[in-house]
Image (cartoon, rainbow, N blue to C red):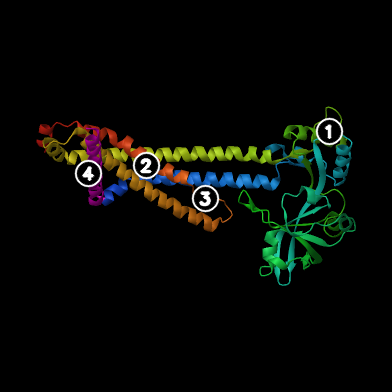
């Protein structure tokens, strides 16, 4: 008995699928137009999902570039200061000697949670080799200790020594983007080559592993590192530079908030601030970027859900209407099937299957459009880490099926409740 019932359900499903296929084939344009809302909805939800996945991936990669254990003591915060910019711009500029004083405080603090403070100065210049050049390269001038706090590993070569730094030697470590731009055919033979930085000869002593782009936008590979004393000699004079930052690394076991508090206390001593005076510096870290990008991600998600919801709602209304029309057009057919013994469940399954089929058609077209859109995005924004996932495809199919069931159930139920005699008399 149970096997007979199961077989009957399978037969009903197969027959409903066949009839649904015939209806779609017979009314191709009408079916496609009816599915337009579902197409837009699935397209939108897939693109939003791809974008959110890309943001998450890029965000995690970007945080690793900044370093989870790193803090950046600077003049300005890593956030929009709005109308308060005058307050920040009036702050005294940073000096590279702050790193030395910070290290003295760290060394003299029992059980300090900090490891090391290193000064860095950022500026931009062009760099060239033979007939090739790269413009607007981000340079970091620093001390030999920078090798301990740098978040990028060396691909080849070495970092400069304390002697090379203190004597102001013309040596440089190049990012992978600079290597590719200047040495496209000899990336493995860069060490010892001579490059010109603003027409001054430098020897390449090391190269960095590829890092990628920060949030898929600003490349961390278009950079070069040179000794601090060398930069003072050729590029920027004096000790007070607007691009100065003090990079501090905490011990792995130290709590982030405790490390931040210790840095603030030490920096207040370095800057000579009295109790009650406000900080005239900022302790930035990767969590500042997280706080900034969080509302952006939330806004994208909300906008995506609203667009998707509206599109699917419009699509569901259209499918419900077209299913009502289909029931009206085929009332006699329903009456005939009921008169020769078709069960109500068979009629219900038939029209539900037609509604779900239209939605699945819309879902597949929406998925195809999403694939095309991603290909366009990959072409124009190759650094953005957009990617499809099995979860997104399952979500697209689930949304399509759910929309079909919800929109087609009422007209399908009404079709199954028609009395055979009344249906056969319908004109």
**Category of crowding for the residue at label 2, using alpha-carbon neighbours closer than 10 angstroms: few (below 14), some (14–19), many (at least 20):** many
Q: Which of 266 and 133 is in front in this view?
A: 266
- Residue sitting farthest toward the bottom: 131
Q: Is residue 117 left or right of residue 312?
A: right
Q: Quadrant of the N terminus?
A: top left
Q: Is mark 3 on a helix, strand or loop?
A: loop
**Category of crowding for the residue at label 3, using alpha-carbon neighbours closer than 10 angstroms: few (below 14), some (14–19), many (at least 20):** some
CB of mark 3 within 8 Å of CB of mark 1? Answer: no
- Residue 400 circle label: 2
Question: Residue shown at 43%/46% (left/top)?
Answer: 393
Dot 3 corresponds to which residue? 387
CB of mark 1 within 8 Å of CB of mark 2? Answer: no
Q: What element carries label 2?
A: helix
The mark lying in front, picked from 4 and 2, is: 4
Residue 226, quarter of the rendered image:
bottom right
**Category of crowding for the residue at label 1, using alpha-carbon neighbours closer than 10 angstroms: few (below 14), some (14–19), many (at least 20):** few
- Residue 111 circle label: 1
- Nearer the N terminus, badge 4 or badge 2? 4
Q: Does the magenta stretch include residue 139?
A: no
Q: Does the magenta stretch include residue 3?
A: yes
- Nearer the N terminus, badge 3 or badge 1? 1
Q: Which of 129 and 158 is in front in this view?
A: 158
User: Residue 159 appears at what percent x and percent y?
Assistant: 80, 56
Q: How far apart are labels 3 and 1 at the CA level?
A: 45 Å
- Residue 15 circle label: 4
The mark lying in front, picked from 4 and 3, is: 4
- Nearer the N terminus, badge 1 or badge 2? 1
Q: Give the range drawn in magenta.
A: 1-27
Q: Is mark 1 on a helix, strand or loop?
A: loop
The relative height of residue 63 versus residue 339 in the rendered view (above or below) is: below
Q: Nearer the viewer, residue 100 or 21?
A: 21
- Residue 186 circle label: none
């Amino acid at each position: 008995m149970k096997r007979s019932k199961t077989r009957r359900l399978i037969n009903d499903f197969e027959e409903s699928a066949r009839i649904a296929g015939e209806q779609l084939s017979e009314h191709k344009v009408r079916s496609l137009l009816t599915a337009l809302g579902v197409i837009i909805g699935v397209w939108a939800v897939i693109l939003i999902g791809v974008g959110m996945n890309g943001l998450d991936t890029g965000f995690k990669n970007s945080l690793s570039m900044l370093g989870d254990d790193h803090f950046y003591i600077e003049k300005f915060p890593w956030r929009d200061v709005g109308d308060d910019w005058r307050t920040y711009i009036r702050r005294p500029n940073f000096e590279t000697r702050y790193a030395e004083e910070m290290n003295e405080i760290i060394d003299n603090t029992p059980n300090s949670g900090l490891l090391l403070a290193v000064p860095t100065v950022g500026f931009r210049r062009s760099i060239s080799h033979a007939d090739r050049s790269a413009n607007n390269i981000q340079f970091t001038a620093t001390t030999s200790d920078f090798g301990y706090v740098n978040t990028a590993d060396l691909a080849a070569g070495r970092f400069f020594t304390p002697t090379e730094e203190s004597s102001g030697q013309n040596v440089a470590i190049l990012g992978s983007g600079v290597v590719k731009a200047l040495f496209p055919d000899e990336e493995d033979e860069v060490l010892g080559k001579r490059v010109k930085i603003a027409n001054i000869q430098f020897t390449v002593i090391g190269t960095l592993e590829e890092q990628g782009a920060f949030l898929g936008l600003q490349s961390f590979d278009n950079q070069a590192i040179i000794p601090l004393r060398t930069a003072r000699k050729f590029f920027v004079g004096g000790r007070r530079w607007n691009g100065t930052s003090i990079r501090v690394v905490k011990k792995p076991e130290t709590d982030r908030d405790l490390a931040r508090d210790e840095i603030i206390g030490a920096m207040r001593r370095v800057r000579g601030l009295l109790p009650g005076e406000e900080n005239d510096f900022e302790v930035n870290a990767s969590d500042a970027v997280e706080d900034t990008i969080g509302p952006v991600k939330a806004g994208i998600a909300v906008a995506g859900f609203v667009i998707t919801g509206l599109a699917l709602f419009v699509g569901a209304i259209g499918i419900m209407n077209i299913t009502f029309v289909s029931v009206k057009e085929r009332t006699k057919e329903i009456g005939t099937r009921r008169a020769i013994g078709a069960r109500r469940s068979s009629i219900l399954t038939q029209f539900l299957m037609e509604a779900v089929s239209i939605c699945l058609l819309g879902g597949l077209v929406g998925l195809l459009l999403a694939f095309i859109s991603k290909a366009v995005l990959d072409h124009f924004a190759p650094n953005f880490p957009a990617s499809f996932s099995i979860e997104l495809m399952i979500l697209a199919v689930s949304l399509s099926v759910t929309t079909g069931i919800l929109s087609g159930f009422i007209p399908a139920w009404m079709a199954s409740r028609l009395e055979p005699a009344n249906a056969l008399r319908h004109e």
